Image: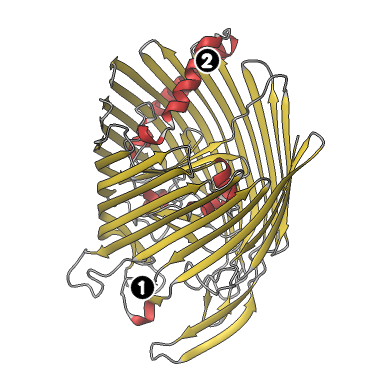
């Protein structure tokens, strides 16, 4: 065992000892109430120095969304890659910088995938998610792990926290969802009050679907003539998945602690792309995603410390039995150990500073002949400071990242040392502070993944990290009042991003032989606009309108001699947006949502042959809350793709036409 791994295990053991001591301490009611007030203050919109978009509570539940990826489509500046169906892989890209530059933080600890750097957000259900937020850059909070300072954009998922009224000791919720594609999706949530200081929640979900849906596949050749027009049924898109989750939450005299255990298992088909009227049916994937994590936050006067420990295991079994392709049966295993210590000191009122250290150990093994079996040690050290003068706020941070790779009997690439700074400022020119002006500058990078560096016959161990420079300037109006207009929120941000040393797959001469190279430089200019208004025209009736629009010019500026020089990069539309209209009256709730994605190109050259037409969808849902004695219930009917449009998010991966879902939820 290496010195780095021994060091990390020692820190993890120490952190575990701290948690055991915390659990035995008596409760101080006054301190716990004060901590709750701090949390409430932190989520006020006016406290955010950094642009943030949030969906939470009822607003999140109203959307016609089954997974986290579905809900993210309603955020400005986000592109979701959806390969179709209930079980299709779903990844997210923020402001065209690439999926690998987007961090996903689940209850305070970032999710990882050292193999390919992509988090499949389709694996995370909204059933027990309390809030979903998107930060461009990083959170305003100083007290966060060093790893969180390194992302170009970050998605934060927060699970539901149990809250008990006087005399309550448990809550239970049962839900059954069924619908098109033979969907069967039961879930259960149990919350227990174990003591005045400790509570627990247990969540379970089963998702089963044949994934079969009709689609129309129509293609026109470059001359404008119809090549073929087919109506068929999507095959091999089935999924059988389970999710189990346990959360323990506790409070102590000086803070709080949390423990989470998570397990996701699935078997699913990979329907593949439809090319020349031929669709494959031979690929299957078995996924196991398991992790345990624990965290503790303690307050000692002006000093606050937060400790995190996580161990994760990922198992992927991929099989391709397609008769027209090389048969593949590969098993991949990932392991990750993560230890973090974040510390904040309040120097004086309105001025704070922090320092954080993270250690990560990642390894990947595969039953592939000659596989490199890489092992990665990452050390991250961040420092940050913030001032709050009420009408002016500023945050500055710097992150030093040290990465060392070991290979099984092979020469490893050189160690990486990267420093990335960031500066954020915001000002409130008006006395009541409902108008704010903000700007930020940030550098970040993404380390090449194990697949980029070491994948057989394709990896390139000489790759450099991708580097991103971000500039942003914006304005926010957030006005709340007790009148007919109960809430009014508007934001607009212009930004410029530059991605250097972009990693791309490039052919190296032989058929079916590719390699990874640092070739790309991408220039990104954009505008994000969001708006929300809530009206209370009559008693017990609320009308909420939410909209967002994104303009992006993301062009390849790598080499003037390329045919695609200054062309829009693949799958990035110039124009996209969404709108949500919600009407709530007593126990009834009617929701309409609209998503639009403009014209795109599916290859580097912006020519007619690579043109992908715009698409839009309309979704409608109607729900009613009712009670049967002491039991609360809710019925929900959803109609997705109401106009039954034929469209592809990714070319040759047709999406479902009109489909339905019915959900019944019971709470006691």
Q: Image point 40% across, 63% down: which residue?
A: 576
Q: Quadrant of residue 373?
A: top left
Mark 1 to mark 2 CA distance (whole Å):
65 Å
Q: Quarter of the image containing the C terminus?
A: top right
Q: Name the spot of residue 176 as percent of width and height, x first.
A: 74, 49
**Residue 492, percent across and down?**
31, 50
Quarter occupied by residue 163: top right
Confirm whether residue 28 shows in the render.
Answer: yes
Q: Quadrant of residue 380?
A: top left
Relative to 331, is 339 on the left or the right?
A: left
Label 1: few (<14), some (14–19) or many (≥20) C-alpha neighbours in 10 Å = few
Dot 1: element? loop
Upstream in sequence: badge 1 or badge 2: 2
Provide the residue designation for mark 1: 510
Where is residue 175 drawn, in percent x and y? 73, 45
The x and y percentages for residue 462 are 28, 51
The disc label shown at residue 32, or none: 2
């Amino acid at each position: 065992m290496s010195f780095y791994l021994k060091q990390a295990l020692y820190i993890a053991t120490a952190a575990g000892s701290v948690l055991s001591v915390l659990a035995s301490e008596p409760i101080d009611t006054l301190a716990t109430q004060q901590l709750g007030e701090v949390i409430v203050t932190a989520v006020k919109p006016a406290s955010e120095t950094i642009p943030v978009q949030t969906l939470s509570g009822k607003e999140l539940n109203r959307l016609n969304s089954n997974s986290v990826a579905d809900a993210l489509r309603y955020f400005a500046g986000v592109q979701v890659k959806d390969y179709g169906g209930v079980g299709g892989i779903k990844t997210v890209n923020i402001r065209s910088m690439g999926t690998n530059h987007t961090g996903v933080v689940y209850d305070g600890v970032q999710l990882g995938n050292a193999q390919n750097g992509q988090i499949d957000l389709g694996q995370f259900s909204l059933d027990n998610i309390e809030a979903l937020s998107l930060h461009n850059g990083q959170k305003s909070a100083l007290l966060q792990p060093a790893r969180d300072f390194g992302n170009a954009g970050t998605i934060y998922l927060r699970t539901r926290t149990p809250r008990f009224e006087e005399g309550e000791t448990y809550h239970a919720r049962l839900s059954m969802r069924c619908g098109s594609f033979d969907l069967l999706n039961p879930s259960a949530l149990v919350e227990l009050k174990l003591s005045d200081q400790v509570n627990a929640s247990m969540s379970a979900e089963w998702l089963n679907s044949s994934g079969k849906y009709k689609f129309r596949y129509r293609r026109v050749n470059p001359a404008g003539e119809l090549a073929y027009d087919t109506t068929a049924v999507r095959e091999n898109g089935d999924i059988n998945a389970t999710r189990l989750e346990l959360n323990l939450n506790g409070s102590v005299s000086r803070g709080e602690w949390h423990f989470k255990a998570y397990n996701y298992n699935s078997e699913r088909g990979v329907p593949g792309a439809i090319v020349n009227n031929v669709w494959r049916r031979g690929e299957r994937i078995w996924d196991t995603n398991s992790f345990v994590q624990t965290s503790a936050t303690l307050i000692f006067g002006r000093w606050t410390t937060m400790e995190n420990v996580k161990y994760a295991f990922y198992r992927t079994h991929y099989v391709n039995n397609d008769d027209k392709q090389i048969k593949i049966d590969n098993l991949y295993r990932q392991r990750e150990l993560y230890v973090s210590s974040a510390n904040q000191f309040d120097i004086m009122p309105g001025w704070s500073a922090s320092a954080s250290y993270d250690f990560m150990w990642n390894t990947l093994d595969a039953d592939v002949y000659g596989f490199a079996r890489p092992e990665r040690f990452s050390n991250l050290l961040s420092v940050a400071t913030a001032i709050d003068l009420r009408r002016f706020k500023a945050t500055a941070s710097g992150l030093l990242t040290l990465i060392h790779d070991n290979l099984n009997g092979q020469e490893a690439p050189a160690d990486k040392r990267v420093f990335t700074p960031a500066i954020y400022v915001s000002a409130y020119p008006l006395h009541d502070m409902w108008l704010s002006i903000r700007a930020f500058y940030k550098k970040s990078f993404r380390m090449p993944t194990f697949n980029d560096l070491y994948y057989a016959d394709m990896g390139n161990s000489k790759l450099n990290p991708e580097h991103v420079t971000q500039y942003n300037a914006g304005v926010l109006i957030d006005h709340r009042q007790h009148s007919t207009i109960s809430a009014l929120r508007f934001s607009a941000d212009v930004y410029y991003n530059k991605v250097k040393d972009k990693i791309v797959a490039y052919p190296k001469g032989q058929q079916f032989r590719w390699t990874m190279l640092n070739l790309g430089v991408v220039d990104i200019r954009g505008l994000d606009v969001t708006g929300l208004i809530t009206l209370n025209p009559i008693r017990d009736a609320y009308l909420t309108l939410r909209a967002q629009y994104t303009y992006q010019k993301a062009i390849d500026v790598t080499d003037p001699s390329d045919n695609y020089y200054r062309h829009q990069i693949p799958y990035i539309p110039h124009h996209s947006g969404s709108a949500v209209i919600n009407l709530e009256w007593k126990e009834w709730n009617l929701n309409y949502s609209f998503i639009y994605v403009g014209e795109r190109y599916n290859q580097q050259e912006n020519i007619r042959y690579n043109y992908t037409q715009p698409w839009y969808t309309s979704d409608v849902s109607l729900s009613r809350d009712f009670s049967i004695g002491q039991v609360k219930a809710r019925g929900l009917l959803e109609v997705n793709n109401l106009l039954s449009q034929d469209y592809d998010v990714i070319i040759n991966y047709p999406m479902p036409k009109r489909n339905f879902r019915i959900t019944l939820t019971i709470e006691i």
